[in-house]
Amino acid sequence: MTTAFLTHSDCLQHVTPDGHPERVDRLMAIYAAVDTIDHAGLLRVEAPLGSADDILRVHPRSHLDAIEQAIPSSGSVALDADTHVSPGSLRAALRGVGAMTKAIDMVLDEEVQNAFAAVRPPGHHAETSTPMGFCLFGNIAIGAKYALDVHGLKRVALVDFDVHHGNGTQDLLWNEPRVLFASSHQMPLYPGSGYANETGASDNVLNVPLDAGADGRAFRQAYERTIFPALEDFAPELILISAGFDAHARDPLANLMLTEADFAWVTEKLCDIADTHAKGRIVSTLEGGYDLDALAASTKAHLEVLLERGAT
Ligand SMILES: [Zn+2]
């Protein structure tokens, strides 16, 4: 089988103010890196617009309405100190939602083995009624609910290796016993949540904070000691990944010391767990990553593992 690479040019139409780290150039860097991958298994897929029905599984109608109403006809509007919308932001964000649900359809219908969505704005900081941290809709949480409610899966695992805590994903799925949400992140750091004692309503949340300066060895140890055993116990039928690459040593927003080899390693291990429990099914979506070279190299390393594993 193959690996789907989902994206859409609408994601280039979400324009942030000059100097903002979450910028159009991020996707351009990823596109250039993906163009250098020579693999017959890479299936390029245009992300559809996500539907209101899918968004409303985790957000109230008032949240969707508020985002729609905030979209300016020109320029850009700040929703908070970090989070901005421009005329193209709604369609861009809807592509992020649609990429998740389309990728889940393709993987669960066995059209592809796994999938990666290169979309922006990212999603894992968006809470139930609060856009924040560059994020408007909780793409990965929407995907989890879609896999559970539309495809009828019983257990979906979400793994978030973005350097920031996935507070939005945690908020949206706090009361959802059919998921396990596992997040590794630097602490203390934005957004300030993600302590190990935040465990969800039914022990369905697993937070693994890492100290500033932690390197690949500490990162791998945290996964081997805590996150992988929990995933093995949970036995997910599908693994979703919040793939943020801002834990890279070069990233300007945080202080972990990972390299692209560490992202390849964690991807490989998640593929192993997916092979054991989930028929190899993985859907990964882009979150952070703000050094363009590190982002491009890390995304390529992540995608190459998915391609390698998707081809066998
Ligand atoms: Zn991040």
Image: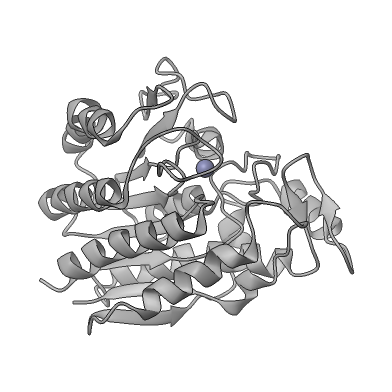
Asked whether 85 or 29 is in front, the reply is 29
Q: Position of residue 299 (x, y in %)?
A: 38, 60
Q: Residue at x 36, y 39 (%)?
A: 179
Q: Position of residue 263 (x, y in %)?
A: 30, 49
Location of residue 189 by image quarter: top right
**Coloring scheme of the render?**
one colour
Residue 151 visible in the snapshot: no
Q: Position of residue 235 (x, y in %)?
A: 19, 41
Seen from this angle, which residue lies furthest top? 197
Is 268 left, or right, of 17 in this rendering?
A: left
Is 164 left, or right, of 44 in this rendering?
A: right
Whether residue 5 is situated above or below residue 72 in the rendered picture: below
Whether residue 72 is situated above or below residue 32 in the rendered picture: above
Q: Residue at x 26, y 82 (%)?
A: 38
Q: How many marks?
A: 0
Is 247 left, or right, of 23 in this rendering?
A: left
Q: Quadrant of the C terminus?
A: bottom left
Q: Residue at x 37, y 36 (%)?
A: 257
Is 27 left, or right, of 90 in this rendering?
A: left
Q: Quadrant of the N terminus?
A: bottom left
Residue 149 visible in the snapshot: yes
Q: Position of residue 198 (x, y in %)?
A: 45, 19
Q: Residue at x 74, y 70 (%)?
A: 88
